[in-house]
Amino acid sequence: MSEAVQLRRRLLLLTPLGVAAAGGVAFLAMLRGMQSGNFDPRGVPSPLVGRRIPDFSLPAQPPDGVGFGSADLLAAGRPVLVNFFASWCVPCVLEAPVLMQLKEAGVPIWGVAYKDQPDAAAQFLRANGDPYARLARDEPGRVAIDFGVYGVPESYFVDRSGIVRWRWAGGLSADTVSQELQPLLRKYA
Amino acid sequence: MIPELGHFALALACALAAAQGAVSLFGAQANQPRMIAAAPALAVGQLIALAGAFGALVWSSVVDDFSVLNVAENSHSLKPLLYKITGTWGNHEGSILLWCLILALCGGVVAAFGRELPSALRARVIGVLGATSAGFLLFALTESNPFIRLWPPPADGRDMNPLLQDPGLAFHPPILYAGYVGFAIPFAFAVAALLEGRIDAAWGRWVRPWALGSWCLLSGGIALGSWWAYYELGWGGYWFWDPVENASLLPWLTGTALLHSAIVVEKREALKVWTVLLAIGTFSLSLSGTFLVRSGILNSVHAFANDPARGVFILGLLALVIGTALALFALRAPVLAPSGLFSPISREGALVLNNIFLCSIAAVVLTGTTYPLFAQLLAGAQISVGPPFFEATVFPLAVPLFAAMSIGPVLSWKRAALAPALMRLWWVALVALVVGLSAAWGFRALPPLAFGAAAWLILGAFADIVGRVRLFRLPLGASRSRAAGLPLAAWGAAIGHAGLGVTVAGIAGMSLASHAIVALKPGQSTPLAGYTWTLEELHDADGPNYMARVAIIEVARGGRHVITLTPSRRSFPVQRTTVTDAAIHTNLLFDLYAVLGEERDGTAVLRLHVNPLAPWIWLGALVMAIGGGLSLADRRLRVGAPARRPLAVPA
C-alpha cells in the first residue's frame, strides 16, 4: 500500500471517533442550555416569546363593556396573563377552576373570547366563573393569528413593558401554574 | 434493614465490577495467568451482588416500604402485586438498576458459557464488560440511588403512572433492555479483538450467537413496545417515529447489519474492520438511546423524571465508553488487514448490499431524529421532523433491501451468477406481482407495493429451502428427508426473513385502515367499514385503584351480531390522571378497535377503527425472533466443533 492510501485509510478509521465526539459536544451544549434555561427541546415553539405583543384593538365582550387593545396592556403597569378561551372548548372548562384560583391570588387575567358568539361566551362565564379582569372578543380570530394562537385555551404572560415572556398552549393545570407561571410572576412582579 | 442491605450490595457490586475491569484487562495485557483465571469469578460475584441489590428493591416495593423514597414516589399500597414488582423498573432509578443487572448478567453468561474461548480473550471480554458496569454502577450509586430513605415516611405512596400499569408494558423494559444491553457482548468482543489485534473466523463464530440472541430480544422488545402503544395509548397507530422509538430502532438496524456481516467474517474472513465498527456502533447507539431518553433532550411518552445534571454524568460515561472504543478502533483497526477476495455478485456481495441499505436507513433515521435538536442548537430554528420525512426516506431504501433479501440467500459464496439465481425465484416474483396487482385499487402506490413486497419476502425466504430440498423435482418423501437434514440455521434464516415479510404485510394492511370519530347518544349507531356500531349504554365501574367509565358498543354486520366492545376511561385518583382503555377485537385478519372519549350532555365521543392485518405487525416480529432462536439453537450445537485457527496477524 502506498503512503497516501495508508494515510487515507487512517483518516477514514478516525471518522467514527470524530462524528461521535462532535455529537457528544453538541449534546453537552444542549444539556448546558437546558440547565441554564435557554435550550428547551420540549414545548410548542412560539416565535412571540421575547418579543413585543402585536398591535391590536378588540371590541368588548359582555359582561365587560369596554374591550381592550395592546395600548391598554402597556398602560396596565404590571404583568398580565392574556388568556384565549371559547365556550365551545372542553379543555377551557377544565382550565376554569385554575384561572379562578389565579384570580383569587391576585393575578390579573385578561380574557379574549376566540371565535365565539358574545352570548355563548357570556353564558360560559356565568356557568364556569369569570376570572377575567378585562374581557374582549376576537370573533374573526385575526388577533389570535397575530399572536400565533395554536388552539384554545392558550395563555400568554406579558410583562409590564409589553414583552411576551411565556406562552402555554393548552389548559393550565395547578402543576403548570406552580412550576412555570409562579416563578415568572415573582421574577417580573 | 433490607434497603440498607440492598444499598450495600449495590456498592459491593460496583467495587467488584471495578475489580473485574481492572484485574481482567491488566491480567490479559500482562499475561498473568492467575489474574486471567480470576475474571470469571469476579463477573459472577458482581452478578450475585447486583441480583441481591435488585431483589432488595423489589422486596421494598412489595412490602410497601414507603420510607424508601423511590417506592414512595412510584408505588401505592392499593397497587396490584404484579405492578408492585414490575413497577420497580418503571421509574428512572429502578430501570438503571435493571439495566446494570442485565449488563452484569452478560458478564456472568460469558463467564459461564465461554469455556471454549481462549482464556485471554475471555478475560478481555469480561474485563470490558466489567469496566462498563463499574461506570454505570457508580452512576447508580451517586446520581440515581434507588435506596435513598425518606423520613418521616408518608402514609401512602404517590402511585405509578397509570399508563404504565399494564401487563404489556410490565415486560417491555426487561426484554428491550436485555436486547439493548446484550449488544454489550459483541461490543466487548470487538474491543477485546482490537486489544489483541486479531480477528479470525473463530471470532465471527463466537460473536454471532451473542449478537443473534440480543437481536431476538431487541426485536421482541420493540414489538412489545409498539403493541403497547397500539392498545394502551389509544391513538390507533403502531409506530409514531417518536424519538424514543427511533432510538430503539437504530441499534436494531445496525444490529441486524452486524448479524449479517459477522456471517461474512465467519465464512470468508472479510469485512473484519466493518464488523468491528458495527459491533461498537450498535452498542454505542443502545447506550446513546438510553442516555437521550433519560436526559430529557428527547420529547416523548417515555420521558422519565429528567434532570440535566444526571444527563451530564451519563454523557461523560458515554464519552468514556464510546470514545475509548472508537479511539482504539482508529489506532488498531489498520492491523486487521482484510483477506479474501470479493466479487459483487455473490452471497457476501449481497450481504454487503444488505449492510449498506440497513446502515443507510439507520443514518436517515438518526438524522431525522437528531436534526431538530441540532437545528435548534446551531441555528436557533424550531423545526420538527415527523412521519412524512421518515416515510419518504425510509421506504425508498427499504424497497431495494427487500429485493436483495430474497435474492441473497439463493446466491452462492465467492462467485455467483445473477441470472440462474433469478430463475430460481421466478415463481416468487410471479406470486408477488399477482398479490401486488390484486391490491392495486385506487390511485395509491404504497399498498400494492407493500403487499407485493410482503409476498416476495415470505415466499423468497423459503425459495432457498425449496431449491435445496428439490421440491417437486424429487419424490415428496425424498424432499422431506432432505428438509429434515437441512441445518437449523437455514430454517432460522428463512423464518427470520419470512417474519419481516409478515410484518410488512401488517404494515401494508394498516395503510388501508379506516377510522371515524363520532358523537353518539346511547341507542344511536353509526356505520364504518361495512359494520354498524351501536352505542348501547354508558355506565360506571370500579377497579382496584381506579374508577372507570365504560361504554358498551354492539358491532353488527348485515344485521348479525359480531362482537360487543367495552372501551373505558379509567381515572386514577392518586395520580389524578385519566387513561383510555381501548377495546380491541381481533380475528388475526383485522382488528375492530374502539376508544371512549369525552362525554357531554349524555353524548359520548367515540373513536372507531377497523385495522386490517394489524396483528401481523407484531406476529411478524415474533416470527423473526423465533427464526433467530432456531438459528441460535443450531449454533449452540456446533460452537465447540471447529478447531481454533492459528494467529493470523500478531499484534
Image (cartoon, coloured by chain):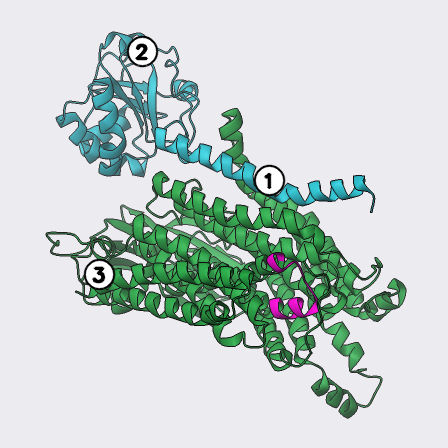
Chain colours: A cyan, B green
Q: Amino acid under label 1?
A: Val
The alpha-carbon separation of the residues under discs 2 and 3 comes to 49 Å
What main secondary structure does the magenta stretch of the protein show?
helix
Question: Mark 1, residues whose alpha carbon is within 10 Å: few (<14), some, or many (≥20)?
Answer: few
Which SS class for mark 1? helix
Residue B71 % position (x, y)? 23, 57
Q: Amino acid under label 2?
A: Gly
Name the residue located 54 percent from the left edge and 68 percent from the top edge.
B122
Image position of B193 (left or right of B526):
right
Quadrant in which the N terminus of chain B is drawn: bottom left
Image position of B570 (left or right of B38):
left
Q: Which residue is mark 3?
A: B545
Closer to us: mark 2 or mark 1? 1
Q: Quadrant of residue A86?
A: top left
Which SS class for mark 2? loop
Q: In the current view of this chain or complex, which residue is farthest to the bottom? A: B477
Q: Which residue is mark 1?
A: A19
Chain containing the residue with disc 1 = A
Q: Which residue is mark 2?
A: A69
Question: Mark 2, residues whose alpha carbon is within 10 Å: few (<14), some, or many (≥20)?
Answer: some
Q: What span is colored magenta in the figure?
A: B194-207
Which SS class for mark 3? loop
